Amino acid sequence: MNVFIIIPAYNEEGNIKELLESVRKMKTPGTRKQVILVDDGSVDKTLEIAESYKNKLKLHILIHKKNLGIPITFYDGLKKASELSSPSDVIFIIEGDNTSDLKILPEMLKKIKSGKDIVVASRYLLGGGYKRFPFHRVLGSKIINYTLKLFFYHKNITDYTIFYRAYSAKCVKEAFKKYKSDLITVKSFAANLELLIKVGEFSNANDEVPFVYDYGLKKGKSKIKITKTLWAYKSLIIKRIFGKIILK
């Protein structure tokens, strides 16, 4: 079994070395790790640092000459993973800023191996939460996730906006087969919700693992554009209300 770990990266020179070193040292018994790093037009040393790990990891680097944003970065990483993987493989998306706790990745992997198709690292499951996070961001995230759960309910999922997830490659391949280049259409961080909706159509079972999001691990500023993302969530909700998004 192959485990593909997608890392979106934009100007992460302060985080990427520590992250890749953690991925290199991480133990996933019975699997082969492959990393797909998508450099989204970084103008710092992110790409240079990543390339220094080519002899230390099974590492695929995709390069955007200019910053194209998280939706295209997600799409390109997932497309590459879908092309390289077999249906029995597993595809992870983690944060490039080193805030995705890799200690819980083996547990997420174990759940996929047991038959789950989507496993989410959840801040809202018992044992999960926030650490060193701005209060307004915590409050906003809780309100948004509560609202999204009302409109886009998926059984056994409580966290609808977190990047850190595991998908069975089978479901990702099915989603690409149906949606092709329209797998991700929104132009903001809300792409993560759209991805959950579309890949979720092919999931037979979902699960979560508690995740503590430690904002203090991040070196550098957040790249999320909150207003643009909220408008994208609103657009997806309107489509859901008018039946243009049908949930399984």
Image (cartoon, rainbow, N blue to C red):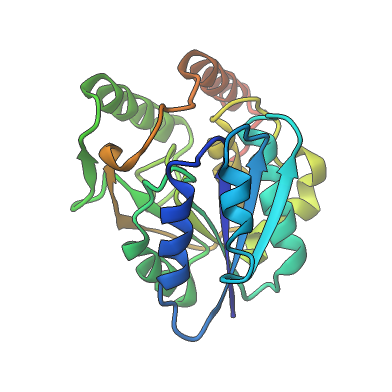
In the rendered picture of this protein, how many numbered marks are placed on residues? 0
Front position in the image: 148 or 70: 70
Front position in the image: 22 or 119: 22
**Is the N terminus in the top left, top right, bottom left or bottom right quadrant?**
bottom right
x then y, percent, for residue 241:
56, 23
The answer, for residue 200, to whether it is visible in the render is: no
- In the displayed structure, 204 sits above or below 199; it is below
- Tell me which residue sits at (68%, 29%) in the image: 67
x then y, percent, for residue 187:
65, 25
Dividing the picture into quarters, in which one does residue 39 lie? top right
Dividing the picture into quarters, in which one does residue 43 lie? top right
The answer, for residue 147, to whether it is visible in the render is: yes
Dividing the picture into quarters, in which one does residue 232 lie? top right
- Tell me which residue sits at (40%, 48%) in the image: 98
x then y, percent, for residue 221:
41, 27
- Tell me which residue sits at (33%, 63%) in the image: 104
Q: Is residue 156 left or right of residue 230?
A: left
Front position in the image: 53 or 179: 53
- In the displayed structure, 136 sits above or below 106; it is above
